[in-house]
Amino acid sequence: MSLEINFSAKVFENRKRKYNEYDEIALTIRQDIIKSLVLAKSGHPGGPLGITDVMSVLFFGSVMKYDPSNSDWSERDRFVLSAGHMAPVQYSTLARAGYFPTEELKTLRKYGSRLQGHPGLDMHLPGIETSSGSLGQGVSIAVGMAMSDWIIDKNDRKVFCITGDGELQEGASWEAAMAAGSHRLSNFCWIVDNNDCQIDGRVTDILSVYPLKEKFEAFNFDVIEIDGHNYQQIQAAFDKFEENHKNNGLPTCIIAKTFMGKGVSFMNDEYKWHGNPPNEEQAETALSELI
Ligand SMILES: Cc1ncc(C[n+]2csc(CCOP(=O)(O)OP(=O)(O)O)c2C)c(N)n1
């Protein structure tokens, strides 16, 4: 491989920020995604690049309560990436939060690595709360976590979960929605990565999941539609979730309108980048744009 790939050691704090401070974080994560995928020679760039801005606010804007030096902290909020194929964005985010050395991002999908193609609990990577990748399953587990916190333990922990929109074609997703809405899990925040792209085309064309807002409302969610690349709107949506939680309101569903492959011109809004890694030349071009 002639392209030299290095990962800076930079980590970011989880604190209230001015919106322009997220640019550096999101850029770093997008670079990590491209770098780890070109080294892995397999994997999914499109979804991870698209959800990076939401992840940046969620993890580095004092939205979630967590402690990278004590990943089992009993009072932590939990994050579940139900769309497990988007693992590169979760791995980079966790590394940039300080859960494990950023150098480890080099090992994505390598034999023996803790960073497999989909998050695995059996890999014992700090920050991973459950295995995911079988679509619909992560969100079902996440709702179970929220139920145990809210109904049984009656504690103050929150659960955040990201699903894809194509993922909603999996029926288990709607069973999870029904349970969260029916039990009024105000501690549950469901984020839909609404890029209208999936593995082999537009979600609209393959099997429409729309109208999303009305469907989640029918399942008893407070639904907030946002531009998933606008930090102000992302922050406002998480603030509304916090308010819903404080007031024992409804569970929150944030429908984040995003572009697959955001940040890299030739990947932008292209479903063909759902699951193909960049080759060296493409990675070089992508990294030259991510500065
Ligand atoms: C139960 C299940 N069925 C099929 C797959 C294969 N699969 C992986 S990702 C994907 C498309 C998901 O689309 P979306 O959630 O919109 O993610 P995006 O393309 O935006 O990354 C499919 C069908 C799977 N992982 N799990």
Image (cartoon, rainbow, N blue to C red):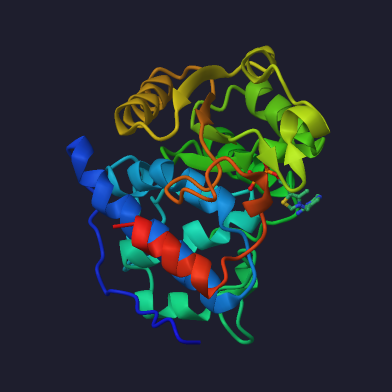
From this view, report whether residue 17 is shown above or below residue 83.
Answer: above
Kindly identify the residue that appears in the image at 74 percent across and 44 percent down. Answer: 136
**Residue 126 visible from this viewpoint:** no
Q: Quadrant of the C terminus?
A: bottom left
Residue 93 lies left or right of residue 274; in this view the side is left
* Viewer-closest of 45 and 78: 45
* Viewer-closest of 145 and 83: 83
Question: In terms of image quadrants, where is residue 103?
Answer: bottom left
From this view, report whether residue 190 is shown above or below residue 221.
Answer: below
* Viewer-closest of 183 and 61: 61
Residue 50, given in percent of the width and then of the height, sits at 50, 44
* Viewer-closest of 17 and 218: 17
Residue 125 lies left or right of residue 61; in this view the side is right
Residue 40, given in percent of the width and then of the height, sits at 58, 76
Residue 12, given in percent of the width and then of the height, sits at 24, 59
- Judged from this view, the residue extending furthest toward the left is 18
Residue 199 lies left or right of residue 107; in this view the side is right
Residue 270, given in percent of the width and then of the height, sits at 62, 44
Question: In terms of image quadrants, where is residue 67?
Answer: bottom left
Kindly identify the residue that appears in the image at 74 percent across and 27 percent down. Answer: 204
**Residue 226 visible from this viewpoint:** yes
Kindly identify the residue that appears in the image at 39 percent across and 63 percent down. Answer: 287
Kindly identify the residue that appears in the image at 39 percent across and 25 percent down. Answer: 237
